[in-house]
Image (spheres, rainbow, N blue to C red):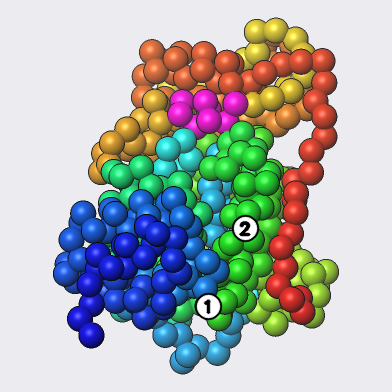
């Protein structure tokens, strides 16, 4: 029978369920161009208004995964694992977690993204390292994962190409904010990486993509349901994003923060806890540790013995960076022309931090994009950011601004002060808000 894309659109428009075969035909047509962009837009709008059943979500995700290369790691002796975060400010967990997991004997083929809106992107951070290739050829990627145990790169053209087609059309047809399409977009890329096990870090709070906890939980439930349904053992943690996770926000400043973390010079407590919580969940899921306590001890050992830092350095070198980035990061990482403290002008306790405002300030300093493909300045941002609950008085530093010139430093300082709300006190909030674990965990 001839495949007619308009019939698929009509069925979904009328709220009828789609067969898996029909979804596969439609996605194949998106990829080879036989389905017109107008038809893709109409399909996305029909899904936006009528949603998808769990079975349709799995079918769409798998069809998008299979639209390109699906990596095969069966020749490796060890669990193939990864994590995904919905993003936030100071969320550089991937930079530490990937080498920590590699030092535990896992293999981590991590496909990451660039900054989106107010949140930073792992690829932009890694490109602060001179020579680091975020888009290596497939053979270099595979060899780095096999030799080092981890490689953090961007989505190549042959991994889930249908997602690129669909996302580009969603972006200009007001259909981005749909749970089914979000789930398929996130998971198709992750599943194309050939994973055994996945952990999801779904953020909630004023700096998160989904600020409301119930919305964050709905996304976490949808992601874990589809990923487990697609055969990848998956768990999710819902974590707080009402303050920066690291004490740095930017690109090179977050690489410095990550290397300090790995070498033990400085480990932000919240960042350490989220990294360990995600890592221990992955190790137990993958069968690499008998329980959470044993998994945490295993992860901490990779920090104490220096093996995680060594893996990070080897990964950077294998992907084109300097061989001594861990030992001599200040020689290689770009530094801003102006670095100075931003001090409080009144007395009180840090009661709230406007993370969207803080993230957009990094963008305004030049550390993010205002249009696709725009070059960014890796040097700029903030570090030494004080957390919620800190008591300050006039002259107490709230953080340091890294800027290209004095005028931009002053503008950044003013916006940082505005982002920090002072009050008489600050209520305590949990860092790990909720956990969604698969059956039999």
In the image: residue 79, left or right of residue 169: right
Q: Is residue 440 magenta?
A: no
Quadrant of the rendering where the C terminus is positioned = bottom right
Image coordinates of residue 23 in percent, x first then y, are 36, 73
Q: Residue at x 65, y 13 (%)?
A: 344
Q: CA distance from mark 1 to mark 2?
A: 15 Å
What element does badge 2 sit on? helix
Quadrant position of residue 351: top right
Q: Which residues are magenta?
A: 354-361
Q: Is residue 355 magenta?
A: yes
Q: Residue at x 36, y 65 (%)?
A: 11
Viewer-nearest residue: 433 or 388? 433
Circle 2 residue: 220
Viewer-nearest residue: 14 or 378? 14
Residue at the far front in the pictured view: 14
In the image, residue 87 sits, relative to residue 201, either above or below, namely above
In the image, residue 101 sits, relative to residue 268, either above or below, namely below
Mark before the other along the chain sequence, 1 or 2: 2
Is residue 11 visible in the rendered image? The answer is yes
Q: Main secondary structure of the magenta part?
A: helix
Image coordinates of residue 249 in percent, x first then y, are 52, 36
In the image: residue 257, left or right of residue 14: right
Circle 1 residue: 230
In the image: residue 169, left or right of residue 298: left
């Amino acid at each position: 029978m001839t495949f007619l894309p308009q019939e698929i659109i009509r069925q979904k428009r009328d709220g009828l369920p789609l067969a898996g075969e029909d979804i596969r035909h439609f996605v194949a047509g998106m990829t080879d161009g036989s389905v017109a962009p107008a038809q893709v837009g109409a399909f996305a709008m029909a899904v936006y208004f009528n949603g998808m059943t769990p079975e349709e979500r799995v079918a769409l995700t798998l069809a998008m995964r299979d639209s390109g290369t699906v990596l095969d790691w069966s020749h490796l002796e060890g669990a193939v694992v990864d994590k995904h975060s919905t993003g936030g400010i100071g969320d550089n967990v991937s930079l530490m977690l990937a080498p920590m997991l590699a030092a535990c004997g896992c293999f981590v083929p991590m496909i990451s993204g660039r900054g989106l809106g107010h949140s930073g992107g792992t690829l932009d951070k890694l490109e602060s390292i001179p020579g680091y290739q975020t888009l290596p050829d497939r053979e270099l990627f595979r060899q780095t994962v096999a030799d080092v145990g981890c490689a953090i790169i961007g989505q190549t053209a042959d991994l889930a190409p249908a997602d690129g087609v669909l996302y580009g059309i969603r972006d200009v047809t007001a259909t981005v904010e749909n749970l089914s399409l979000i789930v398929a977009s996130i998971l198709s890329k992750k599943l194309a990486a050939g994973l055994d096990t996945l952990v999801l870090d779904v953020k909630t709070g004023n700096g998160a993509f989904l600020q409301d906890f119930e919305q964050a939980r709905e996304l976490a439930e949808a992601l874990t349901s589809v990923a487990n349904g697609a055969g990848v053992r998956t768990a999710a943690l819902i974590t707080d994003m009402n303050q920066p996770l690291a004490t740095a926000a930017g690109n090179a400043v977050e690489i410095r923060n990550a290397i300090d973390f790995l070498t033990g010079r400085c480990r932000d407590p919240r960042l350490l806890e989220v990294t360990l919580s995600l890592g221990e969940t992955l190790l137990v899921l993958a069968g690499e540790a008998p329980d959470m306590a044993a998994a945490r001890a295993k992860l901490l050992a990779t920090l104490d013995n220096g093996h995680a830092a060594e893996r990070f350095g080897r990964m950077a070198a294998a992907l084109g960076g300097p061989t001594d980035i861990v030992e001599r990061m200040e020689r290689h990482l770009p530094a801003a022309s102006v670095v100075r403290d931003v001090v409080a002008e009144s007395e009180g306790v840090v009661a709230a931090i406007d993370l969207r405002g803080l993230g957009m300030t990094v963008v305004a300093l030049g550390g993010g994009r205002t249009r696709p493909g725009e070059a960014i300045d890796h040097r700029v941002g903030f570090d030494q950011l004080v957390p919620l609950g800190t008591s300050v008085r006039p002259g107490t530093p709230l953080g340091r601004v890294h800027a290209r010139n004095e005028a931009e430093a002053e503008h950044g300082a003013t916006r940082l002060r505005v982002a920090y709300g002072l009050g008489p006190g600050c209520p305590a909030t949990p860092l790990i808000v909720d956990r969604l674990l698969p059956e039999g965990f």
